[in-house]
Image (cartoon, rainbow, N blue to C red):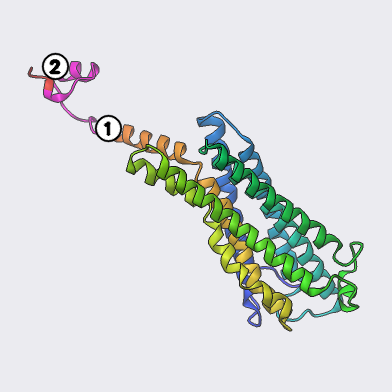
């Protein structure tokens, strides 16, 4: 077993992924907590999208734990023993399971979030279709990851004995999964922009709301970038080195999506905090000030200072 939080110069990518997991775990649990506080205590209206986002964060935590375990088995570019190799392969397969489950709950949460602002019947059906396609694709990946070598267990020996599904099948499914994930985010962003353009809101409100909606789909950028590293995972002879590339962008993709999806719901909290700060600053402005009784009477009645002499 290798120390988790110590970098191996021969393969620094694994350490980068561990670091990213730690950063996103801390940030995302804070923002998920703030999201629930905003919805429960300020708006007083929890919805299914909040619960699905919480489930996505729980699955993402499992995703990161498998990364930590993988690092404990393989620190460099080659495992030290057959037992380490077997443990690392098992961690990667479980990691893929958590990624697929995280994506399912995340896309369901984002879809329901967007349905709050979409009232067109056609666009709502389109969003439901996007949610359904994403869910079905990732459920398929869950079953493929579990049963790609027959009954679960002893994955390494089955890989070496060529008893698993053909590489071309795994490559095709992985690329389709990445394309569906990126396409779903991009589709939601296009629907949001179209809805805002058609709305009667003023330009300032459109930019404000549009920024929040697009923020929730920013993970598609990492999805597109991750897409180009998938072939290298199946074609590279240096598997553990190649897995570092896709592992980094997978961690970023899901972590940023959860973070952005939660930040997009915190506008009421920001507005409340800013209101309290402005109210406090206004009160502080009168401390130590010598005012006449007439000014006090005007302030108590809500009158402007310019009205004192009138």
Number of other residues with Cα within 10 Å of mark 1, as a class: few under 14, some 14 to 19, many 20 or more: few
- Tell which of 196 and 87 is nearer to you: 196
Magenta span: 283-306
Residue carrying label 1: 282
Vertical relation: 267 (above or below) 179: above
How far across and down, in percent of the image, does residue 215 sit?
49, 51
How far across and down, in percent of the image, does residue 196 sit?
43, 43
Q: Quadrant of residue 179?
A: bottom right
Residue carrying label 2: 294
- Tell which of 239 and 191 is nearer to you: 191
Q: Is residue 254 left or right of residue 301?
A: right
Quadrant (top left, top right, bottom left, bottom right) of the C terminus: top left
Residues tagged 2 and 1 counted as in contact (Cβ below 8 A): no
Q: Is residue 199 left or right of residue 136?
A: left
- The answer to whether residue 270 is magenta is no
Instruction: Identify the residue shown where x is 51% and y is 30%.
Output: 43
């Amino acid at each position: 077993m290798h120390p988790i939080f110590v970098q191996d110069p021969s393969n620094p990518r694994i350490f980068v992924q561990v670091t990213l997991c730690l950063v996103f775990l801390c940030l995302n649990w804070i923002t998920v907590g703030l999201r629930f506080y905003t919805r429960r205590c300020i708006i007083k209206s929890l919805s299914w999208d909040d619960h699905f986002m919480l489930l996505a964060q729980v699955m993402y935590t499992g995703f990161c734990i498998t990364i930590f375990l993988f690092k404990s088995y393989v620190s460099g570019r080659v495992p030290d023993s057959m037992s380490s190799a077997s443990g690392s392969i098992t961690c990667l397969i479980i990691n893929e399971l958590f990624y697929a489950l995280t994506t399912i709950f995340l896309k369901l949460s984002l879809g329901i979030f967007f349905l709050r602002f979409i009232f067109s019947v056609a666009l709502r059906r389109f969003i439901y279709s996007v949610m359904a396609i994403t869910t079905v694709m990732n459920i398929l990946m869950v079953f493929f990851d579990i049963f790609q070598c027959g009954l679960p267990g002893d994955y390494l020996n089955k890989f070496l004995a060529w008893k698993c599904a053909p590489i071309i099948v795994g490559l095709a499914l992985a690329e389709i999964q990445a394309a569906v994930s990126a396409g779903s985010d991009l589709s939601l962003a296009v629907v949001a922009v179209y809805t805002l353009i058609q709305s009667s809101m003023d330009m300032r409100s459109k930019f404000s709301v549009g920024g929040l909606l697009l923020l929730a789909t920013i993970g598609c950028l990492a999805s597109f970038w991750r897409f180009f590293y998938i072939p290298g995972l199946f074609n590279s002879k240096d598997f553990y080195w190649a897995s570092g590339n896709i592992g980094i962008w997978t961690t970023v993709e899901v972590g940023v999506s959860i973070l952005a999806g939660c930040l997009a719901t915190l506008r009421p909290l920001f507005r409340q905090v800013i209101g309290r700060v402005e109210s406090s600053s206004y009160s502080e402005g009168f401390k130590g000030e010598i005012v006449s009784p007439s000014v006090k009477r005007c302030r108590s009645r809500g009158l402007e200072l310019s009205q004192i002499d009138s």
